[in-house]
């Protein structure tokens, strides 16, 4: 039995997207980060961080959203839909997954929080402005990397695109405009138009 803990409107969206791409059976346990769900002792026994998502795949427990997406794709993609066929391709998938978590996730989340999510009195416009500025460098890297290819590893969508696009999907709610980066903009639209992404969003 495969269980994913976490509401869709959280980083649980990332493994949900993978499971929809691969057509995997799963049960979603919609624990919410807004409230006390994550402090329950039985949940902390699974994920001592008290965060979502967590995957329980039979008796294997795994947390960290990107570790979960990489694991699911590595283990269950039998058709080459998501998982690269070469060791170098796998290394590139790790590269892009670590990259988006270290270079993009924190400043983009900060812009989202300080412009849209936090109550007005807790927002810091100067922090949002600074972090928006920090996104220029990684967005330029993405833009240049996509100048000669439709997807990060070449001509086909892969787990590298899914992991990067899942983070970049926060651009829309954060109202971070990407049209100055046309390759990035087109690539993001292609990734987010995938039926599995839309199905995951509705889970
Ligand atoms: N690096 C972790 C971050 C997990 C995380 O911070 N999840 C948020 C929801 S998207 C959460 O559980 N927040 C609750 C809290 O921090 O108390 C991952 O990618 O899985």
Image (cartoon, rainbow, N blue to C red):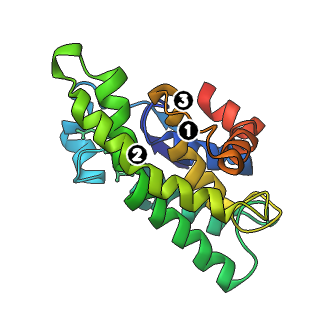
Q: Nearer the viewer, residue 118 or 48?
A: 118
Task: Residue 41: name its quadrant.
Answer: top left
Is the residue marked by circle 3 packed among few (<14), some (14-19), or many (20+) residues within 10 Å?
Answer: few
Nearest to the eye among marks 2 and 3: give it: 3
SS at mark 3?
helix
The x, y position of residue 157, in whole percent, is 76, 57
Disc marking residue 72: none
Establish if 131 lies above or below 94. above
Q: Nearer the viewer, residue 40 or 133?
A: 133
Residue 124 as seen in the image, left or right of residue 4: left
Extreme top residue here?
120
Mark 2–mark 3 CB contact (< 8 Å): no
Establish if 201 lies above or below 153. above
Query: Which residue is pictured at 24% across the width and 45% down the height?
Result: 50
Q: Determine if the C-beta at disc 1 is less than 8 A from ligand 1.
A: no
Query: Which residue is pictured at 59% across the width and 58% down the height?
Result: 142
Is the residue marked by circle 2 packed among few (<14), some (14-19), or many (20+) residues within 10 Å?
Answer: many
Disc 3 target residue = 172
* Mark 2 / mark 3, whichever is N-terminal: 2
Disc 2 target residue = 53
The x, y position of residue 8, in whole percent, is 49, 31
Cα distance between the residues tagged 1 and 2: 17 Å
Q: Determine if the C-beta at disc 2 is less than 8 A from ligand 1.
A: yes
Instruction: Point out the image quarter for the C terminus.
Output: top right
Is the residue marked by circle 1 packed among few (<14), some (14-19), or many (20+) residues within 10 Å?
Answer: some
Mark 1–mark 3 CB contact (< 8 Å): yes
Mark 1–mark 2 CB contact (< 8 Å): no
Residue 152 as seen in the image, left or right of residue 52: right
Where is ligand 1, by quadrant? top left
Disc 1 target residue = 169
SS at mark 2?
loop
């Amino acid at each position: 039995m495969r269980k994913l803990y976490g509401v869709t409107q959280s980083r649980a969206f990332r493994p949900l997207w993978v499971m929809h791409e691969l057509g995997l059976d799963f049960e979603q346990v919609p624990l919410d980060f807004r409230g006390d769900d994550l402090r329950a002792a039985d949940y902390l026994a699974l994920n001592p961080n008290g965060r979502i998502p967590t995957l329980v795949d039979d008796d294997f427990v795994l947390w960290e959203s990107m570790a979960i997406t990489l694991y699911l794709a590595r283990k269950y993609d039998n058709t080459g839909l998501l998982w690269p066929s070469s060791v170098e391709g796998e290394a590139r998938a790790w590269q892009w997954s670590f990259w988006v978590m270290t270079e993009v996730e924190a400043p983009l989340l900060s812009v989202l929080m300080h412009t849209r999510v936090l109550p007005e009195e807790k927002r810091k416009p100067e922090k949002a402005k600074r972090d928006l500025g920090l996104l220029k460098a990684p967005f330029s890297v993405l833009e240049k990397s996509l100048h000669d290819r439709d997807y990060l590893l070449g001509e086909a969508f892969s787990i590298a695109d899914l992991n990067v696009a899942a983070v970049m999907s926060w651009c829309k709610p954060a109202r971070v405009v990407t049209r100055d980066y046309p390759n990035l903009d087109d690539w993001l639209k292609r990734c987010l138009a995938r039926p599995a992404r839309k199905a995951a969003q509705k889970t």
